[in-house]
């Protein structure tokens, strides 16, 4: 009887775990139905969303001018991560593409 009891407890749990949707990528790519990871241009390392609103700078410096401002719903295409504080990024906003630098601190790891 204890075998049936254990089976009746664990079988639904196992079935539930096996039926879960594990298709999310963790980087926001599944949030945008128009652009998936497979559709990324070859120069793009990853696609992400910022944790807070921020600015796209002309150069890798806070003292340089701002190209555009963005909020947390904006997709950011990461092009280069070699700088210590900034990532080179492309942002598409209102059918125009802007390239510049975004602070690493406002992006998820």
Image: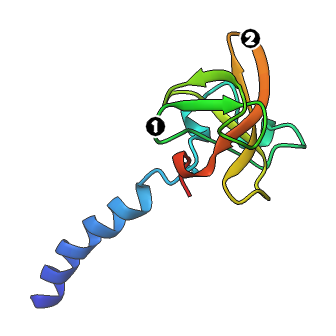
Horizontally, residue 17 falls left or right of residue 36, namely: left
The quarter of the rendered structure image containing the N terminus is bottom left
Q: Quick check: 69 left or right of 46?
A: left
- Label 1 sits on residue: 52
* Residue 30, numbered circle: none
Name the element at disc 2: loop
The spot of residue 70 in percent (x, y) is 56, 25
Residue underneath mark 2: 95
Residue at figure coordinates x 34%, y 69% from the top left: 14
Tag 2 or tag 1, which sits nearer the N-term?
1
Is mark 1 in CB contact (under 8 Å) with mark 2? no
Placement of 2 over or under 49, stated as above or below: below
Q: Pinpoint residue 23: horizontal percent, then vertical percent.
A: 55, 49
User: CA–CA distance between discs 1 and 2?
Assistant: 22 Å
Residue 45 drawn above or below residue 74: below
Count of numbered badges drawn on the protein: 2
- 34 or 20, nearer to the observer: 34
Residue with the most extreme front position: 63
Q: Quadrant of residue 91?
A: top right
At x 28% / y 71%, what residue is drawn?
Answer: 11
Depth order, front residue of 106/29: 106
Point 43% across, 62% down: residue: 18
């Amino acid at each position: 009887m204890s075998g049936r009891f254990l089976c009746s407890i664990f079988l639904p749990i196992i079935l539930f775990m096996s039926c879960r949707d594990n298709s999310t990528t963790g980087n926001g790519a599944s949030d945008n139905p128009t652009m998936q990871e497979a559709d990324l241009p070859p120069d793009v390392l990853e696609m992400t969303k910022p944790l807070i609103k921020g600015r796209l700078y002309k150069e890798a410096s806070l003292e340089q001018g701002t190209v555009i401002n963005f909020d947390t719903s904006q997709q950011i295409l990461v092009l280069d991560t070699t700088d210590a504080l900034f990532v080179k990024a492309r942002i598409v906003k209102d059918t125009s593409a802007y390239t510049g630098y975004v602070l690493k601190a406002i992006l998820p790891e």
